[in-house]
Amino acid sequence: MSQTDATPSWSGYIFQGEVALCKAIEVINSLDNINQKYCLKLEQDEDFSIKTDNLEVFQVKAYLKKGCDKMNSYKNVIEELISKYYYSLSKPKNPYDKRSNIPSSRIEKRKRPIKAYLITHSNISDYDNTLQEYNKRFSSIDFNYFDTIHGQYRLDNIEEKLGNAITQYFAKNNLQLTNLNNVRNYCSQKISSYIKKRHQTKELYSITFTKIIEWLTKPDIEYNDFAWHQIESILTKTLSEDLQALALEEEEKNLEYEKLDKCLLHLEKLDRENLQNLITRLTPHKKFNFGYDVIDSSSVRKIVSKSIRKILLDPNEYENLTYLKDKELYQISTIGDNPEIKTQKQLLLEKINSNTCSDIDFYITEHMNVSKEEVSSRTQNILGYEPSEINEEEIDTKLDDTNSFGLIDVEQTIEILNK
């Protein structure tokens, strides 16, 4: 990963996908007639491309490091785009391997140049649309074929912009939009699944404009898929926002940045089944009714992100976000500092007990500490027997086998695991 690119996961398929979808709907809104061949292409030419009567290609860069607001950070990308899509390309044989070619740009302009765009998260404060500081080869082109869209499609506003594009489509076509959030989230789920599949299978995908319009007007919502997309978005977007903040910090934050970056790269690769398994382990105190309260950004930030950044060890398993030390397994959770939980500790433990994984020794919480012994004493009623019914040795065995977890707050966990 580039040292200036701080969006390995979320920008890789969620942000990039939402930008692509937003641009496609904006183009749809600008057209009077939709040809059946008009389409959005994902990661075929560049990050995405839009084919109408002409082809336009888009490279998305969400650089977040210091200097990302300066033209110099994008010089190589701009020159590469112009070389590929404005000038001709030759592919001479590799002299060392006759089976391969070495693509190189030639000085001749293409007979039909392709319009290329660079989209940047950051606003470029010293942007010069004439590229006067560049080599004449780049500053003398016809700028009808190159442009930079900077600071318009951002990590923090892409949902709003996508919502605006959807609202405009419904207004233009005199259609009733009953629930913007549902339509937007459904479309986001569809596009992210396409891009994620592209990363996993390497297959190429094109999505016709008519298919996108079908998503907008006739969403075939599978509620479970829709809900899982919401949960995944909350988890990955919160971690990505923390990564963004770290990218702008001083050098002493580099280790935290690298650890969170590495974790996001692993999470990107999870399929739906493994994602569901991870979420159930992060939320042992929640019953899954697919409401929006399954996971929240506050607990993700205060527990999950903090654990990943501050614990020096890498997770024992990224797909579960567990840590192993001295034969004890610590599971990151999202058990927060809810006042109701403190006054209803028995209920909390019952919920965890019914959902818990038998291999967990400690669930990492925001502020709560409950020893294994206290968990065992409080959950005897769950086992369906009273202490008088069996001897103490049998009780200890049953409790050890079925209630082997304790709760430990994130600060103590960091201290223990970093020794």
Image (cartoon, grey):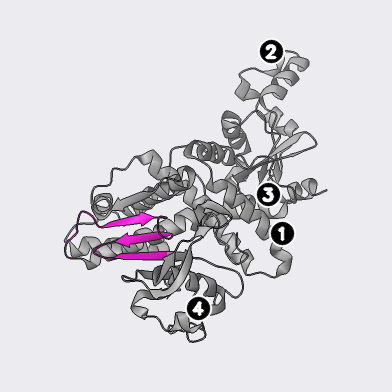
Pick the front one: 110 or 246: 110
Left or right of residue 40: residue 346: right
Looking at the rendered structure, the secondary structure element under dot 4 is loop
Residue indicated by mark 2:
389
Q: Is residue 209 above or below residue 356?
A: below
Among numbered discs 2 and 4, the one appearing first in the sequence: 4
Residue type of the residue flagged with mark 3: His
Residue type of the residue flagged with mark 4: Ile
* Image quadrant where one finds the N terminus: bottom right
Residue indicated by mark 4:
124
Left or right of residue 373: residue 216: left
Among numbered discs 4 and 1, the one appearing first in the sequence: 4
Looking at the rendered structure, the secondary structure element under dot 1 is helix
Which x, y percent locates residue 37? 23, 55
Residue type of the residue flagged with mark 1: Leu
Q: Where on the picture, by quarter, is residue 255?
A: bottom right
Among numbered discs 3 and 4, the one appearing first in the sequence: 4
Q: Which mark is residue 367?
A: 3
Q: Residue at x 67, y 30 (%)?
A: 359
Q: CA distance from mark 2 to mark 1?
A: 54 Å
Pick the front one: 306 or 373: 306
**Crowd band around label 3 with a 10 angstrom C-alpha radius: few (<14), some (14–19), many (20+):** some
